[in-house]
Image: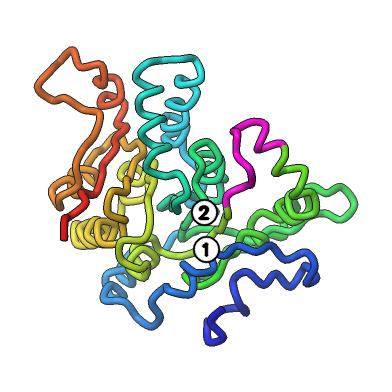
Amino acid sequence: MNPEMPGAGHPFNNELLDSQEKIAEPILEDLFSRIARGETPYTKIISRLPNHSVNEGYGLFTPYGDLTEDIFRDAEDENDVAVEIVNYIKEKLKGGTLIDIGGSDDMRVLRLGMRVGAAATLSVDRYLSEREVDPQTGAINSENSRQLNPDPFTNVRDRVLPFWRKEWIEDREEATRRAARSYGIEQLPEFALVCDDMLDFVSRLPADSSNFMINGIDDLVLQDPTDEYQNALAQEIVRSLKPGGIIFGTNLDNSMSSRLEKLGLERKFTDESNKDSRYRPLTNQGTFFLEKPVVAD
């Protein structure tokens, strides 16, 4: 535990829970303890971006992630291509950390993490809102929601998803049993939400530390940023991607995956020379898989 960590206390100390209810999340706790402090080289680039709000629709989940999840559903239907891809993802992510860049407050990264046996999952998005639960009905009171300020050092999961406190933490043992039955795992992956600009957060991550998922950021999230921003984001993704690790997702505009490929990542499940490739449907819908080569010592 880092006693000097800024923000509202340690990111895994939830003041709404007593000490008996705190969840041990050692993988994410270690990751947060190694996040770089102070300003990053990209502060000026980020400061020049237009300001938006959740009221404009920013921070909402997109249908692009559904296309990525469809691969897992197709694998359950014994589609040969989907089975091959899912087995590949499982091999790469089992026991590792998966970060959804621009992932909104959707829990897709957690669901996929459960499917592939990831040990820890995290979603980072600049536009997240704190919500409250109506004590009488248990429903989320959207009228009292407020947009959170960027803070790369704090897990705001329980503030953004109050039902996590209400249903998952109090009933986490039963939730674990349900997940185990559904996905054949022994326990739920660790899960965090971070409210921050994606470039700022990724640039603070330790080198060679994580795997990533991006869905729809080319078409929706990255409409405003300049080439300077996008190039910097691609460089920081490659830097922090673990050797042998992967970044995958769905974007109809493949500018980000192309940037990553030019930086040395290897594109998987594609054959541009063969128009009848069995992977062609993936390419047509913008789904991609890129792997960071392992460099021999």
Badge 2 local density, few (<14 within 10 Å), some, or many (20+)? many
Measuring 74% from the left and 56% from the top, which residue is drawn there? 165
Q: Earlier in the sequence, mark 1 or mark 2?
A: 1
Badge 1 local density, few (<14 within 10 Å), some, or many (20+)? many
The residue wearing badge 1 is 28
Q: Is residue 183 magenta?
A: yes
Which amino acid, by three-letter code, is at mark 2? Answer: Ala
* Image x and y of residue 170, in percent: 80, 54
* Image x and y of residue 241, in percent: 31, 56
Q: Is residue 258 above or below residue 206?
A: above
Disc sitting over residue 254 in the figure: none
**The residue positioned farthest toward the front in the image shown:** 297
**The residue positioned farthest toward the right in the image shown:** 136
| Front residue of this view, candidates 292 and 58 | 292
Q: Quadrant of residue 26?
A: bottom right
State how far apart marks 1 and 2 are (Cα).
7 Å
Magenta region: 178-189
Instruction: Give the quarter of the figure containing the C terminus.
Output: bottom left
Whether residue 56 is visible here, answered yes or no, is: no
* Image x and y of residue 246, in percent: 32, 45
| Front residue of this view, candidates 121 and 293 | 293
Which amino acid, by three-letter code, is at mark 1? Answer: Leu
Measuring 27% from the left and 59% from the top, which residue is drawn there? 233
Disc sitting over residue 120 in the figure: 2
Measuring 58% from the left and 55% from the top, which residue is drawn there? 190
Measuring 51% from the left and 52% from the top, which residue is drawn there? 121
Disc 1 + disc 2, Cβ < 8 Å: yes
